[in-house]
Image: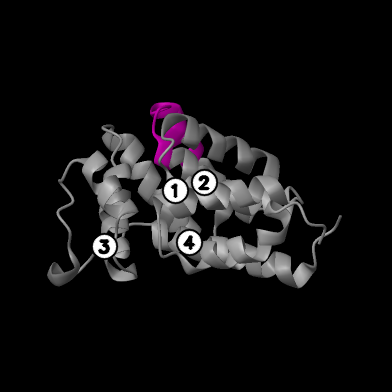
Amino acid sequence: MRMDPMKSNSIAAAFFALVMYSIPQPVSAQDAVPADGPLPELLQQLEAAPDSLSAQRLERSIYSQWSKSGSPAADLLLKRGQSAIESQNFEAAIDHLQVATEIAPDFSHAWHMLGVAYFQTEFFGPAMEALEKALALNPDHFGALHGVAVVNELVGNRQLAYQAYKQADTLRPFDSEIEAALERLQAVAQGKKV
């Protein structure tokens, strides 16, 4: 079954917007949440966030921590890869991020961003492999879960997409793109033909 190109484009645009949001941005002092807090605590706070603004603040802190591998070289390559994605130079992003994952093979966020770069070049197989590697290393990586959901939806695996969106929604509440996807795929989840 083939997806409507307009819907496919809007799903891809939503994923790109998520990616741009997942690239750590400077935050003002009033928006800052202690980025040096324990990551498990930040993840718990995110799951229980009372509102969208709180969730965004916590998400920024989590992404900031996920962007640190312990290897200055891998961290620099991640930043270069993210900059290349922002500039829509996806081939350069893939080059930087492949090297980052070779230097630091346990760097889940570099794998996530590599999946994003592959996705943007429409290499969905390598994108899914990189996103799954990110999740194998960090099962709480809600950005990678969102990416897995988007790829599954685009290739027609709507039940798997729904399940991944549901997991991402649990980890990162108040994401309007995920909420829209869950609503869009609700009938599939209930076993109804669409």
Question: Mark 3: which secondary structure?
Answer: helix
Q: Which residue position is annotated with label 2? A: 145
- Looking at the image, is mark 2 or mark 4 nearer the viewer? 2
- Farthest right residue? 1
* Mark 1 residue type: Phe
The residues colored magenta run 97-109
- Asked if marks 1 and 2 touch (Cβ < 8 Å), the reply is yes
Q: Which residue position is annotated with label 4? A: 18
Percent across and percent down for residue 70 are 26, 32
Q: Reply above or below: 120 against 127.
A: below
Q: Reply above or below: 135 against 163.
A: above
Percent across and percent down for residue 4 are 80, 67
- Looking at the image, is mark 3 or mark 4 nearer the viewer? 3
**Disc number at residue 57?**
3
- Asked if marks 2 and 4 touch (Cβ < 8 Å), the reply is no
Q: Is residue 181 magenta?
A: no
Mark 2–mark 4 Cα distance, whole angstroms, equals: 11 Å
Colour scheme of the rendered structure: one colour
